[in-house]
Amino acid sequence: MKKDLEELIVKSFFDKHVQERVLYELFKPEKRDLALDRLCHSYKRMLKTKYMFEIPPPNSDPSDIFELLKRNKAEKMCYSLSFNKDIDGKEMPLQEALKHAVGFGFPSIISCRPGELAYFEAEQAYGAPPRYLLKTPKYEL
């Protein structure tokens, strides 16, 4: 787990009123799942919606999402916050992270350009889960 990257993700993409609580939960191993669980049903209250851009269907192919992220200047390496323990709290190649996150069924945020660009997949309830690009014009506190 890289606290500096996680703090940057939270301060960039999470609504200001929840940032402190989410960071507290992320940094406590016994509470980490609570922070991720907040992205299941209430992600629109947790994330800055002005930075959320829905990826229109069909959007379930990790390769297509990778190409979309590359067009938005994603870096080759990424950092993930995810219910998927294979990628949570890890830096890895973007393509590999997407293979684990896309279609997993539970939320993931994959930071592709720290503080500026991320991929977010919400929980799958019925049908395909909502998928978004998270883009901020610049890092904002």
Image (tube, grey):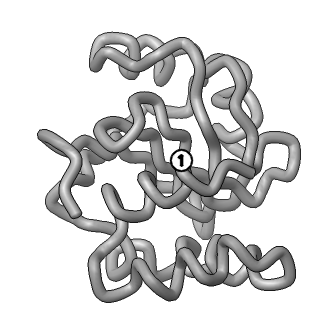
Write the residue at 49% across / 39% down.
Answer: 111
Category of crowding for the residue at label 1, using alpha-carbon neighbours closer than 10 angstroms: few (below 14), some (14–19), many (at least 20): some
Residue 89 is left or right of residue 81, and the answer is right
In the rendered structure, the answer to whether residue 41 lies left or right of residue 30 reads: left
x 68%, y 43%: residue:
103
- Choose top left, top right, bottom left or bottom right for residue 31: bottom right
Q: Position of residue 76 (x, y in %)?
A: 54, 12
Can the viewer see residue 83?
A: yes
Residue drawn at x 65%, y 81% is 25
Residue 84: x and y, percent? Answer: 80, 51
Instruction: Find disc 1 in the rendering and name its residue.
Output: 5
Marks counted in the figure total: 1
- Give the image location of residue 116, x and y in percent: 29, 38
Q: Is residue 92 above or below residue 124?
A: above
Indicate left or right for 122 with 91 as reference: left
Q: Front-most of 68 and 89?
A: 89
Secondary structure found at label 1: helix
Please tell me whether residue 58 is drawn above or below residue 68 in the rendered image: below
Direction front: furthest residue: 4
- Can you see residue 128? no
Residue 73 point in image, percent of width and height: 31, 15
Q: Could you say which is closer to the camera, residue 113 or residue 27?
A: 27
Quadrant holding the C terminus: bottom left
Position of residue 50 relative to residue 110, above or below, is: below
Residue placed at 39% from the left, 85% from the top?
18
* Res. 14 image quadrant: bottom left
Q: Name which residue type carries label 1.
A: Leu
Q: Is residue 137 left or right of residue 21?
A: left
